[in-house]
Image (cartoon, rainbow, N blue to C red):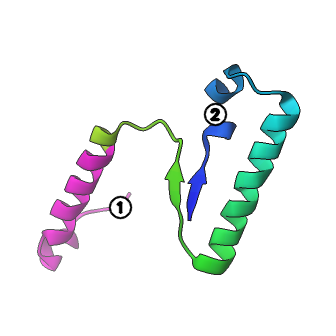
Amino acid sequence: PVIDISPFNSSYKLEKCSSSQLKARKKEEAVKFHNACRDVGFFYVAGHGIESSMLDDSLAYARRFFELPESRKSKLSLQ
């Protein structure tokens, strides 16, 4: 499922949208979020405003990390 969080962003409120329409959109996405967590176990987030290049870079770094030997990864501190 895809959850569109743009109604929760302050910039969304600047569009031509009444407060009741905004409230309805938020509720709709919140219900989708709840159902996805309860019934599916995962979801995609849309409308977050994060540049695709940043997402691509994050995935590339994650791949590089998980390709490291376990002995190297275990030396890294999470704190």
**Most foreground residue, 26 or 57:** 26
In front of the other: 52 or 75: 52
As shown in the figure, which amino acid type bears the numbered disc 2? Asn
Kindly report the distance in space between the C-alpha atoms of the residues bearing marks 1 and 2: 30 Å
Image spot of residue 30 (x, y percent): 73, 55
Q: Which residue is mark 1?
A: 78
Which residue corresponds to the image point at 24% horizontal and 46% vertical from the top-left?
Answer: 57
Say which label, 1 or 2, has the lower sequence index. Answer: 2
The tally of labels here is 2
Whether residue 35 is visible:
yes
- Quadrant where the C terminus lies? bottom left
Q: Quadrant of residue 50?
A: top left
Q: Give the crowd class for mark 2: few <14, some 14-19, many >=20 residues within 10 Å.
A: few
Does 21 sit above or below residue 41? above
What's the residue at 61%, 45% (across, down)?
5
- Which residue is most to the front? 16
Q: Residue at x 27, y 55 (%)?
A: 59
Left or right: 54 as drawn, with respect to 50: left
Dominant secondary-structure state across the stretch colored magenta: helix
Which region is colored magenta? 55-79
Q: Residue at x 63, y 70 (%)?
A: 36
Residue 44: percent from the left, percent from the top?
Answer: 50, 59
What residue would you read off at disc 2? 9
